[in-house]
Image (cartoon, rainbow, N blue to C red):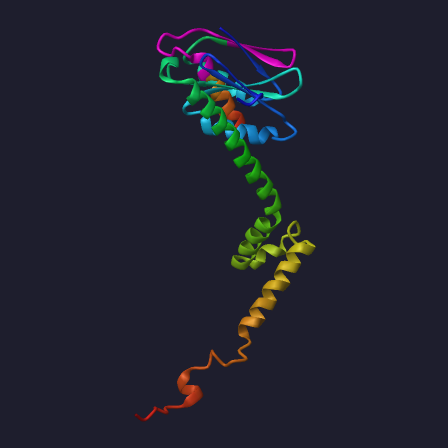
Amino acid sequence: MVISLKEKFYSKEAVMKSIEDFKAVTPIKCVSEDGSFIIHISKVEDVPNIEEEFVNYVLALTQTE
Amino acid sequence: MEKNITITGNCVQISINPKLYPIEVIYSASYVFLDKYYILLDEDHKKNVLVHIKPKKNKSEISEDEMEALAGDFLNELINYADYNVRAKQTQKIREMLIQRSIITNDPEILKNDELNDEEFNHILDKLDEDYDEFLDDPKEIAIPWEEKYGNKTKDK
């Protein structure tokens, strides 16, 4: 699955920290392209909405920075 | 339905003008919804902020009316945090003064530090001295004990 997050709304530090935390659960990769973070995240059986959980996690970290 | 609210399936999309609500306010409002909803922030061609809200529950459990109510709740939360931000800016100076004053009251030696010894701090210290002098003044002689003031006179009944 691919998620696109605008760099304008999500901080780089929050994205990096989220990747660090999620990579223990599933393979995850991030590239920066046209002002967006493009995140490739693999499905996990136990967590059906892992991409949305990831986005929520990044938003929470961005807000609390 | 409001023109800035779109409901598609189990997702509510709200378009927000960033001139009305700064991004910090949108973050704060979104944060409130994170435990029950999935939130995604995006941008449209008019540079408005698009907030996608998707319930964590299954679609069958949520009616369209509930989705509209959800969008309304989000907009209310935006106003709540916008107001909070405005008030926080208005009262920033007084909050700083209160904290500085409480620190100085407990430890006046802190003013010996060059970084803190500015005009504002001196003003606060002067004000504290004035307050202390006022405390020592006793024009109505309240601080004088009863016995000292009236002796051992007792009122005969």
Residue at image coords 66%, 29% = B19
Check the image and report above or below for B125 versus A25.
below
- Residue B48 x, y percent position in the rendering: 63, 21
How many circles with numbers are drawn on the protein?
0
Please provide percent x and percent y for residue B40: 52, 18
Q: Image point 39% across, 13% down: which residue?
A: B59
User: Residue B130, image x and y in percent?
Assistant: 61, 68
Residue B89 lies in the magenta stretch: no
Left or right, A52 with reference to B98: left
Question: What percent of the width, then of the height, locates residue B131?
Answer: 57, 67
Magenta residues, start to end = A29-53
B32 lies above or below A15: below
Task: Name the residue rendered at 54%, 31% in the picture.
Answer: B78
Quadrant placement of the C terminus of chain A: top right
Q: Quadrant of residue B88?
A: top right
Question: Is B56 located above or below residue B133 in the figure?
Answer: above
Q: Residue at 36% x, 16% y: name it.
A: B61
